[in-house]
Image (cartoon, helix red, strand yellow):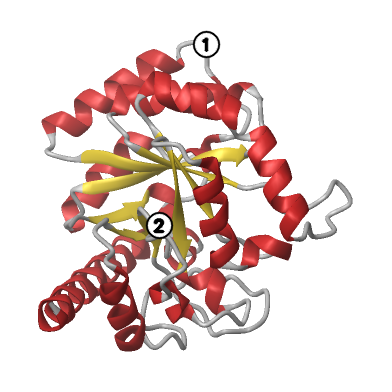
Amino acid sequence: MKTVTTTGVFPNGHDTSDALLRLKDVGFRYLDLAIDYLDYPGSPLSSPDWKDWAKSLAKLAEKNGVSYTHAHAPGGASSRNEYMMRSFELCEILGIKYMVVHPISRHRDKSPIEEEEFLKLNLEFTPPLLELAKKHGVTILSENLLWGASIDPRIISKLVERMDSAYFGWCYDIGHANCQEVDVCIIDQKDIITPLSLHLQDNNGIFHKDEHLIPGDGNINWERFLKALAKSGYKGDFVLEAHHQSREAPDDQRDAIIKRLFCKAEELKAQFLRIKGEIQ
């Protein structure tokens, strides 16, 4: 079980090589590449030479004993832009096996999509991306979000079941559940397919306020959640998406915040493994 952090702990435009080296220095050896934060004009991913950049990043990671294991796509299941297309090849170059792709959860007017339409639209729009996923050796992970049917992990699980693909699973974002008044321990229900990944983050349970805090800085009961996670049979990594505090901090304070994030994650992982051992 790996301790992984999103590279989104650094703000847009921050040099990816510097981010890698600084994350290594605080203890992280496994990274979740925030490709969604590379979706801007002038980013390395927008360059005509983006493959050279990707290959140099892969070499730097290998040289420093760091691995990119997860990623977050720039867009959702309906996206067909150049950034999304490049993301799959980027994952292959970096050896990334899992990439979160947001499900279609709202209409163009931002109104939420409810269950049957949610399932229909995502089952229609996702398969072309699954072809790319298969070609590049990536598993697409859907995610519980903040609108309509996407709020309910049981419906995300139902989407995985109906998609019925070896290249499709889901990522459980505990922070999204907590600020949408969903019991974070819903994960251990028998009718929910076990997620392949997690987004671990905290918040204060304020409706629709997705704060992405370091675990322990909000009101989530982590002991209770870890017990439910252990009962669910989860076998994936501990992937942190607790990035707002470090993104918004002055750069000279950022490493200390990220170090605290790493230490808290290691503490939670040890706690989870202890609980898992006790219930087996």
Q: What's under tag 1, amino acid-wise?
A: Pro
Any mark on residue 61, and which? none
Question: Residue 267's quadrant in the figure?
Answer: bottom left
The residue that appears at 36% across and 14% down in the rendered structure is 52
Does residue 190 sit above or below 216 in this rendering? above
Tag 1 residue:
48
Q: Is residue 78 visible?
A: no
Q: Position of residue 247 (x, y in %)?
A: 47, 59
Using the rendered image of the protein, determine whether residue 154 is visible from the camera's viewpoint.
Answer: yes
Foreground: 121 or 273? 121
Residue 251 badge: 2
Q: Is residue 176 above or below residue 126?
A: below
Residue at 67% from the left image edge and 80% from the top image edge: 207
Marks 2 and 1, how far apart at CA:
29 Å
Contact between marks 2 and 1 (CB within 8 A): the answer is no
x and y percentages locating residue 105 in the rendered image? 71, 53
Figure quadrant of residue 180 = bottom right
Instruction: Give the secondary structure at mark 1.
Output: loop
Pinpoint residue 37: horizontal percent, then vertical percent.
53, 42
Q: Quadrant of residue 188?
A: bottom left
* Left or right: residue 201 compared with residue 273: right
Residue 79 image offset from top left, x and y in percent? 66, 32
Image quadrant containing the N terminus: bottom left
| Relative to 267, 238 lies left or right | right
Seen in the picture, residue 91 relative to 269 is either above or below; the reply is above
Instruction: State the residue in front, 64 or 267.
Output: 267
Q: Which residue: 28% across, 21% down?
A: 56
What residue lies at 52% left-to-right and 17% top-to-bottom? 47
